[in-house]
Every structure is written in structure tokens, then in C-alpha cells.
Image (cartoon, grey):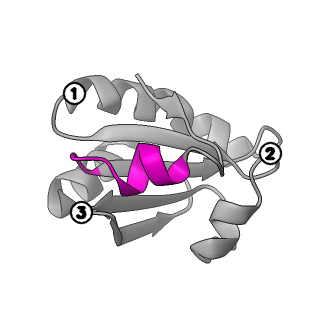
Amino acid sequence: MTKNVSDSSFEADVIASTVPVLVDFWAEWCGPCRVIGPALEELSGEFAGKIEIAKVNIDENPMTPTKFGVRGIPTLILFKDGKAKATHVGAAPKSTLKAFIERNI
């Protein structure tokens, strides 16, 4: 299951995590963001114990996307050992998202 992360919880939930965290930067009004949402939910189950999948609503939490240079959404950033390791911008089919995760964890 994906979890919602805020500007105030990002450090504890993502940077300090002992497992890799895939962060989905999204917004309610973003059509492509809503398209990949169900795939990310499924992938969070498939990768349970290996990674966590978190969501940051950019409208409610403007500081974190700015800090990591998010310019378009959806943007997925995989954090490992407290650092941004890989980025994927734009909607993609579940198979592409799964391959992105497998390549980078």
C-alpha cells in the first residue's frame, strides 16, 4: 500500500528509510497521475518488503518537489540510502514502472 508523505514527514519517511522508497510526486488535477496510481498500488504489494512507495501531493507540499527539482508531474524519484538514485518523468504502463524499479533497487 502506498503512503502519503508531507513536507514535514519527508525526512523521516523517505530520507531516513532503511529500504528504498519510490516517491510519486502528483496532484489531484493531474490526469496522468491518476492513470498510474492503480499500477503503483499494485507494485507496492508486489515489492512489499523490498521497497516502499510514497506519494507527495505537490499542491499541499510545495517545498519537497522544489528541493528535488520536480518540474512536471507525475515524477517518480527512487531514493536509496537517503539519496535520489533514479528519476522517471511522465505516465507509463505498469510493466515500464516495474522495470524501472527492478533496475534501480
Above or below, comparing residue 21 to residue 52 in the picture: below
Residue positioned 64% across, 62% down in the render: 64
What kind of element bears circle 3? Answer: loop
Q: Residue at x 75, y 45 (%)?
A: 27
- Residue drawn at x 80%, y 45% is 60
- Tell me, for residue 1, which label it has, or none: none
57 left or right, relative to 46: right
Region in magenta = 10-20
> What is the CA distance from the residue labelled 1 to the residue labelled 2?
27 Å
31 relative position to 10: left or right: right
Query: Residue 70 location, x and y as percent?
Result: 63, 71
Q: Amino acid at mark 3?
A: Asp
- Specify few, some or many for label 1: CA neighbours under 10 Å numbering under 14, 14-19, or 20 or more: few
Residue 92 in sight in this render: no
- Under mark 2, the amino acid is Glu
Residue 88 to residue 18: above or below: below
User: According to the image, label 3 marks what residue?
Assistant: 81
* Residue type indicated by callout 1: Ala
Chain-order first, disc 1 or disc 2 = 1
N-terminal of the pair, mark 1 or mark 3, is: 1
Marks 2 and 3, how far apart at CA: 26 Å
Q: Residue sitting at 34 percent across and 70 percent down?
A: 83
Tell me the residue that label 1 is attached to. Answer: 48
Under circle 2, the secondary element is loop
Q: Position of residue 105 (x, y in %)?
A: 17, 56
Any mark on residue 60, and which?
2
Circles 1 and 3, Cβ within 8 Å, touching? The answer is no
- Most foreground residue, 66 or 97: 66
**Front label number (1 vs 2):** 2
Q: Secondary structure at mark 1?
A: loop
Q: Nearer the viewer, mark 1 or mark 3?
A: 3
